[in-house]
Image: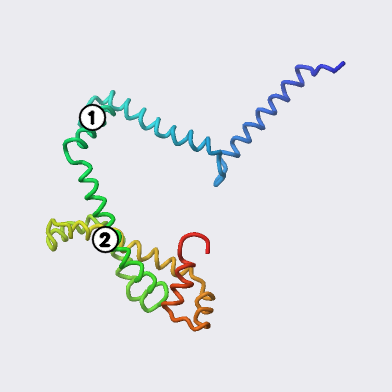
């Protein structure tokens, strides 16, 4: 016959299990840089959206001012009306074109300059002071000046995008250029490679995304 565990002993054991489970949950979810289960990430992501929608709905009911905080159905009807009657998709297409074109122009200029600044101290010493001064200025601050100089055409809009991208991207490329190991370039030079060839074969691969 099996001995029965007294209730006074079973209760502390179950309490200890609950405490261990609670400490395990705290270690899982409240430890810095600790990965959490994929299901928990999904639940938290959905929960954040639900919280926003709930507060939005309650706020639109309590405030009762559609000009300040319209309800979700009202926003949905306005969006459908813009798509059907106000050429909303055309505006999105034009805005996307301007953003992509401005970024490509800025990248075509920033990447070569950034590589040169990351490779040659004389180039970095010359260009870095003005770039550091301008990159903290918001691109929108240049809009009045650009309207005076370029008018209200597409060139002015592309220039605003260029200003917002170029100066930040240059310094990012400079930082990437600093990460290229000197040993790799020296080996390329020893084998007879020129500076452009060494950067194409060694520097660009080391500085690029992904494993080297």
On screen, 2 above or below 77? above
Q: Where does residue 65 sit, x and y in percent of width and height?
A: 22, 27
- Residue 53 sits in quarter: top left
Left or right of residue 49: residue 140: left
Q: Where does residue 126 sit, x and y in percent of width and height?
A: 33, 76
On screen, 99 above or below 32? below
| Nearest to viewer (mark 2 / mark 1) | 1
Give the structural element (helix, strand or loop) at label 1: helix
On screen, 99 above or below 70? below
Left or right of residue 11: residue 95: left
Q: Nearer the viewer, residue 68 or 164?
A: 164
* Disc assigned to residue 115: none
On screen, 64 above or below 208? above
The answer to the question of whether label 2 and label 1 lie on touching residues, with beta carbons closer than 8 A, is: no
- Residue 100 sits in quarter: bottom left
Q: Residue at x 23, y 50 (%)?
A: 95
Left or right of residue 19: residue 85: left
Q: Where does residue 29 sit, x and y in percent of width and height?
A: 56, 38
Classify mark 2: residues with Cα within 10 Å, few (<14), some (14-19) or many (20+). Answer: many
Give the structural element (helix, strand or loop) at label 2: helix
Q: Residue at x 63, y 35 (%)?
A: 23
Q: Which residue was labeled with disc 1? A: 77
**For marks 2 and 1 on the same chain, the one whose residue lies earlier in the sequence:** 1
Q: Which residue was labeled with disc 2? A: 162
Left or right of residue 4: residue 92: left
């Amino acid at each position: 016959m099996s001995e029965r565990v007294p209730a006074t002993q079973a209760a502390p054991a179950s309490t200890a299990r609950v405490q261990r489970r609670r400490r395990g949950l705290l270690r899982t979810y409240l430890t810095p840089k600790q990965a959490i289960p994929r299901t928990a990430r999904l639940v938290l992501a959905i929960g954040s959206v639900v919280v926003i929608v709930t507060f939005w709905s309650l706020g639109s009911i309590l405030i009762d001012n559609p000009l300040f905080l319209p309800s979700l159905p009202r926003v949905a009807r306005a969006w459908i009306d813009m798509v059907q009657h106000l050429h909303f998709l055309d505006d999105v297409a034009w805005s996307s074109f301007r953003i992509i074109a401005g970024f490509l122009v800025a990248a075509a200029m920033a990447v070569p300059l950034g590589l040169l600044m990351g490779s040659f101290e004389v180039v970095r010493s010359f260009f870095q002071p003005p770039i550091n001064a301008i990159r903290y200025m918001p691109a929108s601050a240049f809009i009045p000046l650009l309207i005076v100089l370029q008018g209200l055409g597409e060139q002015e809009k592309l220039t605003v995008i260029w200003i917002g991208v170029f100066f930040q991207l240059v310094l990012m490329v400079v930082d990437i250029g600093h990460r290229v190991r000197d040993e790799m370039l020296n080996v390329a030079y020893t084998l007879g490679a020129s500076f452009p060839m060494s950067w194409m074969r060694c520097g660009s691969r080391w500085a690029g995304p992904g494993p080297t």
